[in-house]
Image (tube, helix red, strand yellow):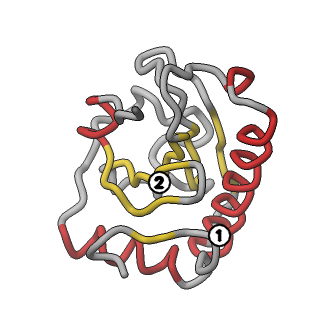
């Protein structure tokens, strides 16, 4: 049975679910930062997914990345599956701007997180929803 890693649950706000992956918003308002977590047990690497799930993860990643680029007018979308701190497979999708606080460096460990308030979370997810409508089931509170 799939269980979300406690660190991801602590750092993220559940936004919804694609066919394969849970979608989280990382609770740091400095960057629109979303994470896809495939709902599969004991998977730490993309190659451990079966072929169908690998293809589905790529679809979901592309849907999300394109939606983020459009919704947030991103200069760049950083996509990464590192897993050094949390081994459960998860894929980061981070909206980057040339004038953001960490540019051009990676965001990890750069600055302390600045949590969203409830209104900011709602606004962030609403922006995503303007362009990401079809293949996702939004969590309660975002429908």
Q: Are marks 1 and 2 in contact (CB under 8 Å)?
A: no
Q: In the figure, is residue 73 to the left or right of 85?
A: right
Q: In the figure, is residue 112 to the left or right of 94?
A: left
In the depicted structure, whether residue 136 falls above or below residue 101: below
Q: Residue at x 35, y 35 (%)?
A: 4
Q: Secondary structure at mark 1?
A: helix
Q: Secondary structure at mark 2?
A: strand
**Image coordinates for residue 71, horizontal then vertical, percent:** 59, 75
Residue with the most extreme top position: 84
Within-10-Å neighbours for mark 1: few <14, some 14–19, many 20+: some
**Image coordinates for residue 131, horizontal then vertical, percent:** 62, 80
Indicate which disc residue 104 carries: none
**Image coordinates for residue 83, horizontal then vertical, percent:** 52, 21
Residue designated by label 1:
67
Q: Residue at x 67, y 66 (%)?
A: 69
In the depicted structure, whether residue 97 falls above or below residue 11: below
The image quarter in which residue 38 lies: top right
Image quarter in which the N terminus is found: top left
Q: Residue at x 80, y 44 (%)?
A: 55
The image quarter in which residue 126 lies: bottom left
Q: In the figure, is residue 92 to the left or right of 3?
A: right
Given this view, does label 1 or label 2 mark the residue nearer the observer? 2
Residue designated by label 2:
23
Image quarter in which the C terminus is found: bottom left
How many angstroms separate mark 1 from mark 2 (CA)? 13 Å
**Image coordinates for residue 57, horizontal then vertical, percent:** 69, 45
Q: Residue at x 74, y 22 (%)?
A: 47
Residue with the most extreme left position: 117
- Dot placed on the residue nearer the N-terminal end, 1 or 2: 2
In the depicted structure, whether residue 101 falls above or below residue 7: below
The image quarter in which residue 7 lies: top left
């Amino acid at each position: 049975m799939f269980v979300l890693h406690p660190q991801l649950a602590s750092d993220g706000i559940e936004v919804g679910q694609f066919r394969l992956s849970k979608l989280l918003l990382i609770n740091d308002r400095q960057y629109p930062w979303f994470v896809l977590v495939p709902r599969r047990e004991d998977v730490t690497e993309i190659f451990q997914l079966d072929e169908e799930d690998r293809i589905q993860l790529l679809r979901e990643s592309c849907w999300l990345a394109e939606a983020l680029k459009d919704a947030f007018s991103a200069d760049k979308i950083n996509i990464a599956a590192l897993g050094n701190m949390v081994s459960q497979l998860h894929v980061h999708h981070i909206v980057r701007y040339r004038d953001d606080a960490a540019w051009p460096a990676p965001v990890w460990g750069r600055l302390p997180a600045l949590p969203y308030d409830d209104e900011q979370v709602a606004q962030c997810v609403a922006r995503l929803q303007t362009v990401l409508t079809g293949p996702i089931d939004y969590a309660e509170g975002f429908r």
